[in-house]
Image (spheres, rainbow, N blue to C red):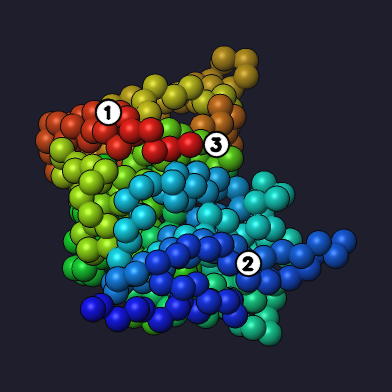
Amino acid sequence: MTPVRAPFEIGGQSVPAGSRRTVDIPVSVLSDHTPVTLSAHVIHGRRAGPTIFVTAGIHGDEVIGAEIVRRLLTMKALGSLRGTLIAIPIVNAFGFLNQSRYLPDRRDLNRCFPGSAKGSLAARLADLLMREVVARSDLGIDLHSAAIHRTNLPQIRVTKGDKEALRLAHVFGAPVILQSTERDGSLRAAASDLGVNVLLFEAGEALRFDELAVRAGVAGVLRVLHTLGMVGSRGVPKPRGKSMLLKSSRWLRAPQGGLLRVFRDTGDVVSKGELLAAVSDPFGEVERDVVASIDGIIVGRAVMPIVNEGDAIFHIAQTASVERAEDTLQVLRTDLEGDPIFDEDEII
């Protein structure tokens, strides 16, 4: 007879094996005496396995992650979960309520890790997340979108040279994998110092839902859980294509201020010298072209039609073969648009 697993302890509460519960961990009290909590939904399986956290809303205006977590928690595959899943749809409740990237003290939470129990509001929230969630986990998946007025192609970011993170990034199955350095103060960097890998998922734009981005996120998390032996294969989609690993990227910036007309979109494969956009003054007297400086894939772009000189317009990841990139991305686009996981009546 298999011994019963011990309850999972978090926030001073116990979640028995074979159960799921939303645990509200006190964070602070607003100036009007409204309490604020870090709300984590814990699924503690009957059988042993890894402990994985999925976080969203570290930046309060990045709402796509909250929808990914919501859909994830409706999936039937989680009913027989091995191990433990900690899902937090909104880390930065302060920013979420204000539709802002930041906390009330104007700090970026993702530059305040590992935090401090006696520091600023952002530092205290970062410290709480590290102690209660990250330190108890074997792996994390952190969900983000582009900043306000920008949008991103679904992508996973990993640290160069981290073979295990790269393996899991390919399992996730986003169209693009980008190698990027860990930023000081980020959740990914602080978790790495504890020996916990974090996959950073970027997709869509702030304050907006993007259906394909949400699908990519839900499918990717399920694939990782399946690979780690936490869920079975039923309902877990297999990508028909392989993610493209891209080792470098650069931003193209507005050559002048004015009105921006964009001719290419995220996910488009472009060639060096190709016309991507034009910036004109409001009178139509002066117009400057924006052309691709490298062969690559547009993995992010500005969505506002008004720009100042030097504003970032296109984020292009370099590729060695335009033709191969186009073929690969077409397969992955088709995969997301017709993903069988979303043909089932599992999502409310």
Q: Earlier in the sequence, mark 3 or mark 1?
A: 3
Instruction: Name the residue located 56 percent from the left edge and 62 percent from the top edge.
Output: 22
User: Label 2: which residue?
Assistant: 24
Return the x and y of residue 262 as percentages of the image width and height.
44, 24
Q: Earlier in the sequence, mark 2 or mark 3?
A: 2
User: Label 1: which residue?
Assistant: 338
Instruction: Name the residue located 43 percent from the left edge and 33 percent from the top edge.
Output: 211
Nearest to the observer: residue 59 or residue 148: 59
User: In terms of image quadrants, where is residue 241?
Assistant: top left
Quadrant where the image shows the N terminus: bottom left
The kind of residue tagged 3 is: Arg
Instruction: Name the residue located 26 percent from the left edge and 33 percent from the top edge.
Output: 340
Return the x and y of residue 72 as percentages of the image width and height.
41, 48
Is 206 above or below relative to 232? above
Q: Earlier in the sequence, mark 1 or mark 2?
A: 2
User: Label 3: which residue?
Assistant: 208
User: In terms of image quadrants, where is residue 161?
Assistant: bottom left
Is 122 above or below relative to 299? below
Q: CA distance from mark 2 to mark 3?
A: 26 Å
Q: Is residue 180 left or right of residue 63?
A: left
Disc 2 to disc 3: CB gap under 8 Å: no
